[in-house]
Image (tube, rainbow, N blue to C red):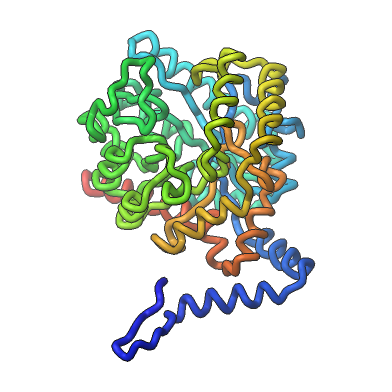
Amino acid sequence: MQPVHTSTGKTFVLPSVLFFIALCAACSQMSEEQLVAKARDIHARVLTIDTHDDIPLNFATAEVDPGVRDDRQVNIPKMQEGGLDAGFFIVYVGQTARTPENYEKAKADAMTKFNAIHRMAQEMYPDKIELAFTAGDVERIHRSGKLVACIGIENGYVIGKDLSLLQKYHELGACYITLAHNGHNDICDSANPQKDFGDAEAEHNGVGEFGRQVIAEMNRLGIMVDVSHISKQAMLDAAKLSKAPVIASHSSARALCDVPRNMDDEQLLALKENGGVIQITAVSNFIKKAPPEKQEAEQKLREEMGLTSPAAFEQLTKEQEQEFNRRRKELDKTWPRATVKALVDHIDHCMKLIGADHVGISSDFDGGGGIEGWDDAGETFNVTLEMVRRGYSEEEIAKIWGGNLLRVWREVERIASSEIASKN
């Protein structure tokens, strides 16, 4: 989307750019009320999917009831209020030392979260939310008027070294698996090696031999390969190794915020070539890099509360979690968080670089996500409003909010079906 310079010295703007400028001009002439009304109409029509919502081990119990409007960022009432149609509830297990005992514990913790998500949708609130196992399920459930629950696994560590667990988890509803988290595992290298586990900068120099088998089996089963959290080389490897498009379930653009968890332009172009999609995530520190003073204050708070590992966060009581969130928000008063505008800046960058077919949205709510203007599911409309302000068409917004993710998911399913057919 650049001007075209001719030999005569004249400059012409490509039609697509002219169209975008015209849309922006039209939006600038609308009153605030007209803009909001237009955005609300679009928001009501498009299918909105958030690809990353974390849950605790005691989810879907009396302690953490998803049907109650409490202080958690994602629950059924807030999804309804904000017009968030579908959420990927996450089976997250933090990386620990790779021992036989820890492999078993990781598997057990994963099953606890699978069971919780099923309990929410099938026992507690089947009239309000339904579990989707396929891309088609998402659209069918949405048409029925119910909310959609999908399942993603964060950290392939939960399979240990047992490939057969992939089929088990898929049958339970796992639609994507993030290959690694913070710390290397047996599959691939992480973007954030953990010294506590003895991690070198790289262990596999990308995706390891076991990881190649994992990706092949995910392709065979129809599980989306998620390249968030993994090292740059591992991401580039995965995009080449996977026969199906990959996703980055919760990452942002490194060109705008230079942190290891984000994707640089080389990675984004590789994602486009693979046919995949990046889900821009509403984690403030991945949207706008926090100043050193805030990083130091946040680290001091975590240390003071004993939150020096992912496992420690999992063990927080409800009261401790509330206290941590309260004190973290106090820091935000001194060093403000990123805004919805900054989030859409990342969408803009990716749209210009890799096009409207490869960009999506995620929140990472209840796992560190939350920005000014989109701090919980009840504020989801504000993201649509900002895209409308910038002249995004309804077709583009529909792709970004869910259409692109569903396209990738359907292609993953198609390739899995063709793999099965070729072996019969």
Residue 261: horizontal and vertical position, in percent?
Answer: 42, 38
Q: Residue at x 73, y 74 (%)?
A: 30
Image-based side of 29 in relation to 174, left or right: right
Q: Residue at x 50, y 60 (%)?
A: 348
User: Which quadrant is home to the N terminus?
Assistant: bottom left
Q: Residue at x 71, y 48 (%)?
A: 82
Image-based side of 226 in relation to 311, left or right: left
Q: Residue at x 57, y 43 (%)?
A: 282
Taking depth in this image into account, of 353 and 208 the one nearest to the observer is: 353
Q: Reply above or below: 39 against 171.
A: below
* Residue, far front: 293
Taking depth in this image into account, of 407 and 312 the one nearest to the observer is: 312
**Residue 167 visible from this viewpoint:** no
Q: How many marks?
A: 0
User: Which quadrant is home to the C terminus?
Assistant: top left
Image-based side of 183 in relation to 114, left or right: left
Residue 320: horizontal and vertical position, in percent?
Answer: 68, 17
Image-based side of 73 in relation to 286, left or right: right
Residue 66: horizontal and vertical position, in percent?
Answer: 69, 31
**Residue 92 visible from this viewpoint:** yes
* Residue, far top: 101
Taking depth in this image into account, of 238 and 369 the one nearest to the observer is: 369
Q: Reply above or below: 195 against 273.
A: above
Residue 109: horizontal and vertical position, in percent?
Answer: 49, 18
Q: Reply above or below: 260 against 422.
A: above
* Residue, far bottom: 8
